[in-house]
Amino acid sequence: MSENLKQSTGIRILIFLVILFVSGLIGVAASTVFMLMGDTGLKIGQGISSIMMFVVPPIVYYFVTRKEHQMRDLGFRSINKPWLLFLLAGIAVMFVSMPVTNQLTVWNENMKLGGALQTLEDMLKALEETAAAATEQMLKVDTIGGLLFNLVVIALIPAIGEELTFRGVLQQGLTRRMNPHVAILLSAAIFSFIHFQFYGFLPRMFLGMLLGYLFYTSGSLWTCMLMHFLNNGSAVVVYYLNHKGIINVDVDHFGEAQNTWVLIASAVVTVALIVWCCWKKEQARIKN
């Protein structure tokens, strides 16, 4: 405990939640003002909200709970060797897993609560339709400047902030107290839950698990930040190209597998890549 202040786990969690709550309120208030200023204001407001919700809290938290303010404590460390292979494996995982992610999306969207929960289901669907409409409004740009702006707001800021919060703080904190695989699963579930999108819970949790394993095996937050950016950024670019008529794809089902064997191959290769990364991490640990 030489680096950490002598606070119990519960107190640390409470401190982080308070910081998250206060920072989030400030972000919502500031973003609301900008969102009243049209499409550009909507994007600026979204960016401010993401920064205040996910970028600021983990940084403030570590400065409050650490005696030695080292950014490496947040996960900003060199990538484990062989770093190039870890990066290539990460890129492969993000794209090879797309059919599995899309299939999870289809299953999730087809879930029916019904019965006594029908009112809740209708409310959840209405909220997600509103969120989807806002996202589509943000994505509809016709210039390179608009595309770059979207890449920053929709891809870069969330990649930095969400990885700081869910991998840098949450996953690392859980890993110190439990099995790392359980910690990855729990942090991925919380990562998905905090987006408050029931009909996107499964694919987002799956993405959180992939990012969690990339962080765990590579030892660096840079890896999962890059992969998170590639995941969000590729969607932004595909939507832009489709909107401009440069390509003609079904954006909502981009990467979806029409063949069962393609889906199976996607799952097998994704698992194999994650297992390989875990094996390389263990080999490096044994050598050291």
Image (spheres, rainbow, N blue to C red):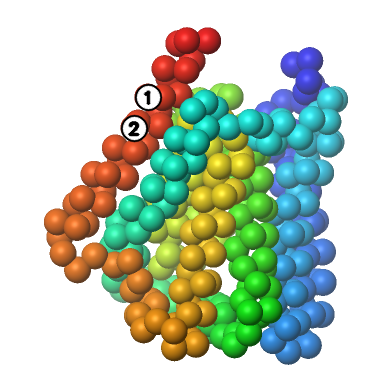
Q: Position of residue 270 (x, y in %)?
A: 32, 45
Residue position for label 1: 279
Up-down: is 71 above or below 226? above
State the residue position of label 2: 275
Tell me the element at label 2: helix
Identity of the residue drawn at 61% across and 55% down? 159
Quadrant of the frame with the N terminus: top right
Q: Position of residue 223 (x, y in %)?
A: 56, 42
x 45%, y 11%: residue: 286
Q: Which mark is residue 218?
A: none
Residue 185 falls left or right of residue 145: left
| Image location (x, y in percent) of residue 24 | 75, 60
- Asked if marks 2 and 1 touch (Cβ < 8 Å), the reply is yes
Q: Is residue 212 above or below residue 125?
A: above
When asked about the image quadrant of residue 41, the answer is bottom right
Q: Residue at x 71, y 30 (%)?
A: 73
- Is 35 in front, or is 70? 70
Mark 2 is on which residue type? Val
Q: Nearer the viewer, residue 40 or 107?
A: 40
The spot of residue 38 in percent (x, y) is 73, 89
Q: Amino acid at mark 1?
A: Trp
| Element assignment for label 1 | helix
